Image: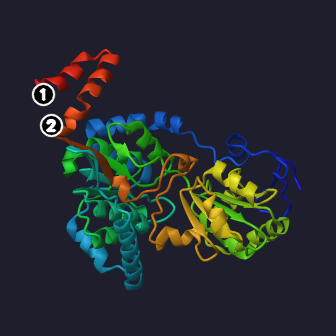
Amino acid sequence: MVSVGQSEQGLDSVIRTLDLRGQVLNSRNVNELVPRAAVDISMAVDSIRPLLDDVRDRGAEAIVAVTVERDGVDPRPIRVEANELAKALAELDPSLRKAIETAIARVRAVSLATMPTEVTVELAEGARVHQRWQPVDSVGLYVPGGKAVYPSSVIMNVVPAQVAGVPRLAVATPAQKDFGGRPHPTVLATAALLGVEAVYCMGGPAAIAAFAYGLPQVDLEPVSLVTGPGNIYVAAAKRALRGQIGIDSEAGTTEILILADASADARLIAYDLVSQAEHDEAAASVLVTDSPALAEAVAAILPSVAAATAHTNRVLAALSGQQSAIVLVDDIAEGIEFANHYATEHLELHTENVQDVLARITNAGAIFVGKYSPVSLGDYMAGSNHVLPTGQQAKFGAGLGVHSFLRAQQVIDYDSTGLAEIADLVRDFAESENLPAHGQAITARFE
């Protein structure tokens, strides 16, 4: 086998194998040895800043101009009309409609069950602190286009926002050349199923700027929060405009890490690695295992699975990139350590004693337990949300959910008895910080 930092790729191999047995793992070397695809959001921010400024200054004119220039279509009317939404829903394939409605119901059920609850703490007589949850007043929900169509992203964005009680929702999705410069009809139909009336034909960083600054020409007021996945330029726009708007995360290209031992099914693992590789040439597909036999079996099966899919070239580009690998470790304990350092968007566990392994996982956007819980289930129908943190952001961030659209507010409710009990202590604090007026504001109430 190869040593750390090297790769071994035979003539028939489509993915490198990395042998880390006997190595000490830490966050730096794990993410240097299996780096995500090379992206530089800061450079992307610089490249799109003139466009963001143009949308701020010219509004809808800038949206039309950039869409014509880059996509070769005119997106007008930018606001999708009610009859277009109704037509898309009427023409939706019945079997697909059933799948979409089932996904909506499942995501809604999970969102309702995970709504945070209000809490009241009584610290003493007359001394109470309440915590309540308030929805943001408006959200811009971004649904990407590009290499695929994502009605699933409409569901994942809209449903938890509705459950949270957000009063104003606006959806943006790119113009599609294949549909005469209109958004994909399945995306429109899904929005219509969910009762979303404010849908805008715009995409990329220009759409994020439109959410931030508003488009008065098409009745789009600025929003408070923007959520949803996108490419590097969408992520760059979120970074550049954060502060003007709140954002969920800088969600980037998809990634899957599968932690498996000798008990795993090599064929299923190969299919799951390919399923995420078909998203994008920069997608990361990583297998971590303590079984050389499993590693060899997966490497042997991958070429035929990749060749049989509709997007073979895209899959092969992703699997052969620096961001993908089969990684050998000494044991599953070391595999868990690798997974926590890598902090993947999607983590699949194919091991014996899987609940014990799950208990030791700390960093992952979403965790899929056992061979009947593949990532593609989570992409559509599991009831979980597929808008998840990428690029190690799982170390400090969470996937999209009902909580993403809520703010915790503390309400302080003291009466004279409650305040009198700690009045002297407040004054002592204030004097120690040389802020005597703070203490005087307390004692004035008892003079």
In the picture provided, is 199 more to the left or to the right than 290? Answer: left
In depth, the one of 116 and 119 nearer the eye is 119
Q: Residue furthest left?
A: 447
Residue at image point 37% right, 68% down: 113
Q: Position of residue 153 (x, y in %)?
A: 42, 63
Task: Note whether residue 325 is visible.
Answer: no
Residue at image point 48% right, 73% down: 382
Question: At label 1, which amino acid type do we have?
Answer: Arg
Residue 445: mark: 1
Residue at image point 19% right, 20% down: 440
Q: Find numbered disc 1 in the image and state the secondary structure of the residue it sits on.
A: helix
Residue for badge 2:
416
Residue 15: mark: none
Specify few, some or many for label 2: CA neighbours under 10 Å numbering under 14, 14-19, or 20 or more.
Answer: few
Number of numbered labels in the structure image: 2
Q: Residue furthest bottom?
A: 94
Q: Position of residue 210 (x, y in %)?
A: 30, 45
Residue at image point 37% right, 60% down: 157
In the picture provided, is 149 more to the left or to the right than 63? Answer: right
Task: Note whether residue 332 is visible.
Answer: yes
- Which badge, 2 or 1, is on the more N-terminal residue? 2
Q: Position of residue 78 (x, y in %)?
A: 27, 55
Q: Position of residue 87 (x, y in %)?
A: 27, 75
Question: At label 2, which amino acid type do we have?
Answer: Ser
In depth, the one of 198 and 349 nearer the eye is 349
Q: Does 245 sit above or below residue 172?
A: above
| On-image quarter of the N terminus | bottom right
Separation of marks 2 and 1 at Cα, in angstroms: 8 Å
Q: Are marks 2 and 1 in contact (CB under 8 Å)?
A: yes
Q: Find numbered disc 2 in the image and state the secondary structure of the residue it sits on.
A: helix
